Amino acid sequence: ERTGSSVSVTLEYAYDDWCIAQAISKLPAGQPEGRYLMAGTNLHNEFMDRSRNFLNVWDASSGFMRPRKSDGTFRKDFDVLSTHGQGFIEGNAWNYSLYVPHEPDALILLHGGKKRFIQHLDSLFTMYLPDSFFAETEDITREGIIGNYVHGNEPSHHVPYLYNYAGAPRKTHYWVRHIMDHKYLPAPDGLSGNDDCGQMSAWYIFSALGFYPVAPGSDRYDLGSPLVKEATLTLENSKTLTIKAVNQGPDNIYVRKAELNGKKLDRPWITHDEIMNGGSLVFYMSKRGY
């Protein structure tokens, strides 16, 4: 830990390396641009191995990602709430320790399984974070926080959708809708944080449509709680995807069931190809979580 941000860098580079591995896997080996694959899959495997470097900063004793010293040992002085000098950029251990968007199943195992992971997420959203823990931090203000979940800074944006991976999609529905209702306002300062690269706005647009890419580079889009009653997407291939929310309303925040092209979905996600093929995605909304 020499830079003050080693954990953030390790986690973000791990995801970046995973994205590179996905790009390599798409290169046509028989074409000039696929020349890096001619020796086999070594390069792909190298980046996949590097994508698991998040394991190097996981501290099982504390249950958080934690900075190591140059001798390989974990730093002793460690405050999981503080955003200053703990190995993270504009965030704390609670939020950044969940930044493994490319391997959420591995993250769940690190936390001891689905039940304990759900409890961990529940604590994140409902605990109280004193002002002193984010004072003088540019991108983190009280307006962008729910409990200890920081929506005002982009590295946490996938977190509400992680409930899907733990078998609790109703909690994804609840928190996604809560964020849209309370952290986006029709005012000049209506965003709860800097709209870096348009991500704050992109999160809202995706979530309002009812799905979100937890790990861009994957073909999976996780389902949430749509805010629109109906929307039509005109896709690059000239096909259209029509999205409808039946029984939509401010109290009906839970998805009772979802149908893709008339067939009930038995999973809380859709794929990129399913979006690009066009058709219809229908959400049936309810006051009750399932």
Image: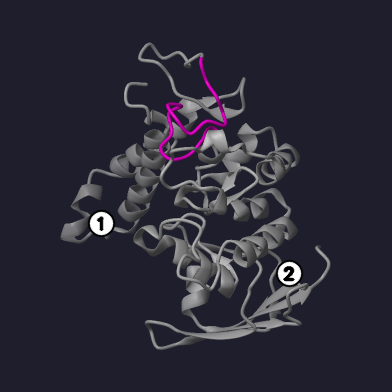
Residue located beneath label 2 in the image: 253
Residue 104: % across, % down: 57, 45
Residue in view at x 38 percent, y 11 percent = 71
Identify the image quadrant of residue 287: bottom right
The secondary structure type at the circle numbered 1 is loop
Relative placement, left or right, of 256 versus 136 is right
Relative placement, left or right, of 78 versus 289 is left
Number of marks in picture: 2
Residue in view at x 35 percent, y 48 percent = 21
The secondary structure type at the circle numbered 2 is loop
Can you tell which mark lies on residue 29?
Answer: 1
Identify the image quadrant of residue 47: top left
Q: Which of marks 2 and 1 is in front?
A: 2
Q: In this view, does 30 lie above or below 211?
A: above
Relative placement, left or right, of 230 versus 89 is right
Mark 2 or mark 1: whose residue is earlier in sequence: 1
Q: Nearer the viewer, residue 17 or 142?
A: 142
Residue 28: % across, % down: 27, 60
Q: Give the residue furthest to the top.
A: 71
Q: Which of 118 and 205 is in front in this view?
A: 205
Q: Nearer the viewer, residue 104 or 194?
A: 194
User: Which of the image's four quarters has the C terminus?
Assistant: bottom right
